[in-house]
Image (spheres, grey):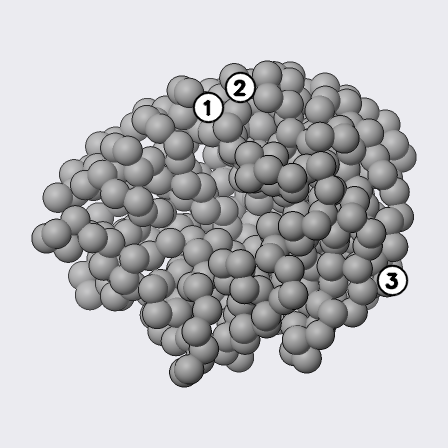
Amino acid sequence: MRTLRSIAPLGVVVALILTGCAGGTDNPNAAPPGTDTTVEESSPQETGSGHGEIEGAEEVAEPQLHLVSIDRTGAVGMLNLLDGTSSEPGSIDPPTAVTSDGRYLFADTDSGVEIVDSGVWTWDHVDHFHYYRTSPSVLGTVAGEGPAVVTTSGNATTGGTGVFFPESGEAVLLSNEALSEGRIEEVFRLETEPHDGLAAPLGSGALVTSVDESGTVSGVGFHGADGSPVDGATAPCADAQGAATTRIGVVVGCADGALLATYEEGEPRFEHIAFPDGTQAPRATEFRGRKGRPAVAALAGDQGFWLLDTRAREWRFVPTDQPLVQVSAASDDDSHVVAVDRQGRIRVFDGEAGAEIAATDPLLAEAVATAETAAGIELTVDRERAYVNDPVAGLVHEIDYRGDARVARSLETLTSPDFVAETGR
């Protein structure tokens, strides 16, 4: 049974200004790294009339791409990928996992989820983009018990971020607008039965998993901005695991496929996308893709990977000759999927043809040698490059996945890259 508790906002308020866009599609920086000019369906998050401007932030001509590294002690470092300079925004409690939306880092710690603002972001206004930078900072902690499941949205200054604590069953929706103002504000916090669930931001509210009488996760329900469930806004999704925001909508993994939730005219709409008939492969439970694109990829156990095109509403299973550690979709047209295999190679596949395009030598052989070290490998893909950390060697490799998987750079970060995110995307 759910109850709703109101939580007082934390931190200091900074004024927010969202103004209308004066620009159109004639952006002189139409295709810099990390962006795409393809006109797509509207985002599942409301973009409003503004273009992401925040008081005190500087609008710049190109995305301010950075690598943010956090070591196991909680020391945070930033590496500017444009000019090679480094900075130290501060430190957090020792993390056990880190999730990022391309601006913020959400780190699991003993006290809950601690949030780092990298201070760089791209505002996606569907047909063009705006790029901003401001000072990085450590924002504070979302209190909670045990490891959390964090689901991010499409824009760093609107919509929300979902945090779910399985041990307590608490589902939290954070305001991204408040985060962009330098404060943590819980839009709502729901108490549900403890279970392995999730909270995924959608429109002005969030999808929250539900359990049946036996305690098994059976589906999701949409909760509005006040935390109340919306009548009729539910959908079955047996054993829901894994969620991601794509250009088209929010994907939630189900035992028999995926649930695609879109937000239209102020209401959620649900579609079920079943796995292909006759395909015997482990289900998808964690989705990764280039930010703001319609395609996502997921591991299929040790057998290969799944590719889900949310625009076409179809799955594709691609078997591989080696088990994979990480996989991410990179292109709109399914032509590039980037993966790390258990030999430590970065491999590039044509997702539509199911064939390998290119591969590196074993770059991460020591890092993938054990399950513990392999679990620390993080793969991020932007428009031009892929970034993968090697916590054992203390490096982050920049891969030109569109150019025969060439290792463009091997980068040393200010702090050990035990946890890494590319920001400014």
**Residue type at mark 1?**
Thr
Residue on which disc 1 sits: 109
Q: Quadrant of residue 382?
A: bottom right
Going from N to C along the chain, the mark reached first, 3 or 2, is: 2
Distance between mark 3 and mark 2 Cα atoms: 37 Å
**Residue type at mark 3?**
Gly
Q: Are marks 3 and 1 in contact (CB under 8 Å)?
A: no
- Left or right, 145 with reference to 3: right
Query: Percent position (x, y) of residue 139?
Result: 53, 24
Residue located at (55% from left, 39% from top)? 371
Compared with 81, 309 (above or below) is: below
Residue located at (50% from left, 75% from top)? 315
Residue on which disc 3 sits: 403
Q: Are marks 1 and 2 in contact (CB under 8 Å)?
A: yes
**Residue type at mark 2?**
Pro
Q: Quadrant of residue 388?
A: top right
Residue on which disc 2 sits: 94
Distance between mark 1 and mark 2 Cα atoms: 6 Å
Q: Count the labels in the image.
A: 3
